[in-house]
Image (cartoon, grey):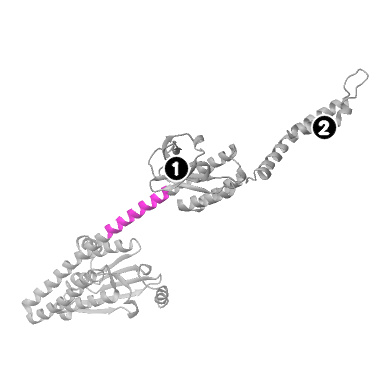
Amino acid sequence: MLLASLTFSAYILSAPILLIRDSKGEMSPQAVALMLTFWILSVIIYPTLVQASDWFVDKVILQRTNYETLKIEIAKIVNRHETIELLLQSVCKKLAQAFTASEVRVLTSHSSHSVCDVAVPHSHENQELTFQIVMTDFATKFSSISAFENSENGITTDRSQTVTATVFVPTTEHPHYLLVIGELGAGRRLLSDDITILEAIALLIARRIDALRVNHERCERSLREQQMSKLATEAELRALRAQINPHFLFNALTTIGYLIQTTPNRAFDTLMRLTGLLRAVLRRSSGEFVTLGEEIDLIESYLEIEHARFEERLRTHIKVPEKLRSLRIPTLLIQPLVENAIKHGIGPKREGGDVTVGAEIGKEGFLQISVTDTGAGVSEIELARQRKRGVGLANVEQRLKGHYGEVASMLFESASGKGTKVQLTLPLNSVEISEDFKKSLIKGV
């Protein structure tokens, strides 16, 4: 209409020129040039007129927002939220502002029907409003309906509101969602480009919801797997710890049996010490961790029992600073190493030797616990055979791996006739201590 009006106005203004004729009665060259100029200008000005008319209709008459900008803003809102409920609430609020709707709300269907299913109302004269699941293509997912609200049994009527349209959100799996657009401002209706942008927004929401559901399912599956792995690890650690107790008891009873044959009085004293020691072990059996000080106390009680058998042949030294005794370590972690040093290091050596238990904070901030003996020592081949065949060392290695993974380590140094050193390296960050205390320990190295 604008183009026709401009053309007609140009014709009226240029009519005198168009009426000029030459001597032969034909149209003058000036008139032909003017006609061609008007024709070219009309072709050039047409896109501008279309844009101007679109702007006038959108901004002045309908007061619509820019849909490209709206789609970008909706995409930002959708990608910002990590929960479906907040996502839908934010989108509804934005759509209500963009379409000047009285409200935009969400209906949820927990029915496990096809992805193409949508709830469409069917009213009958003497019956309540009911809902039927029907197959529909994407173009027909917009339908004018009476107002309704959510209820426990589905959707119920509320005739006090007016609904302009419903927008089906095509998620892959149930629950499915339906955006209900209320009455639009100034009595306007949805046009074809309104429906097009709503379809695009619904598809954008559906893809984000599907992605969130996949991520949530993946996280839940990962948590379940971690929980199962944790339970399996805890069961394995409890079994390993329980394995240490009878192993330790067996060796202690062997010592008492030897003393009964030689010095019965000392055997009785040793039996009383063993009773107190076992009472302390059983009292701590409910927990996987003890303080380093409690572990050292247990080792000292055990060494008193072994002194009854080795007498002057066994000399022991405990070098654990007082400030480290509050650190927590797995229970019965050092005792098997001390027991192994006495059995395989001091026992075979006729003149006996020294066993030293030490602890310190290394330069890299790790807790280093060492058990050193000056006993017989072993070669690398014999050491590998003992680690494979023995219970204590294999048990300690498995428990270290179960508690700390690859972070902790157990290193051996041994030479025939010179003794053996076993060093445990444990991460301080796995121990429940304050950062200030940890820094003070590292600073004091």
Q: Residue at x 22, y 75 (%)?
A: 298
**In the drawing, does residue 22 fall left or right of residue 445?**
right
Quadrant assignment for the C terminus: bottom left
Amino acid at dot 1: Thr
**Badge 1: how crowded within 10 Å, few (<14), some, or many (20+)?**
many
Q: From the image, tell me which residue sits under label 2.
A: 10
- Local SS, label 1: loop
State whether residue 338 appears in this view.
yes
Q: Is 144 included in the stretch rendered in magenta?
A: no
Q: Residue at x 50, y 40 (%)?
A: 145
Q: Kindly report the distance in space between the C-alpha atoms of the residues bearing marks 1 and 2.
A: 56 Å
Q: Quadrant of residue 229?
A: bottom left
Residue 358 percent location from the top left of the image: 30, 76
Magenta stretch, overall SS: helix
Q: Quadrant of residue 435?
A: bottom left
Among numbered discs 1 and 2, the one appearing first in the sequence = 2
Viewer-side residue, 361 vs 93? 93
What residue range appears in magenta?
Answer: 213-233
Quadrant assignment for the N terminus: top right
Query: Farthest residue in the top direction?
Result: 24
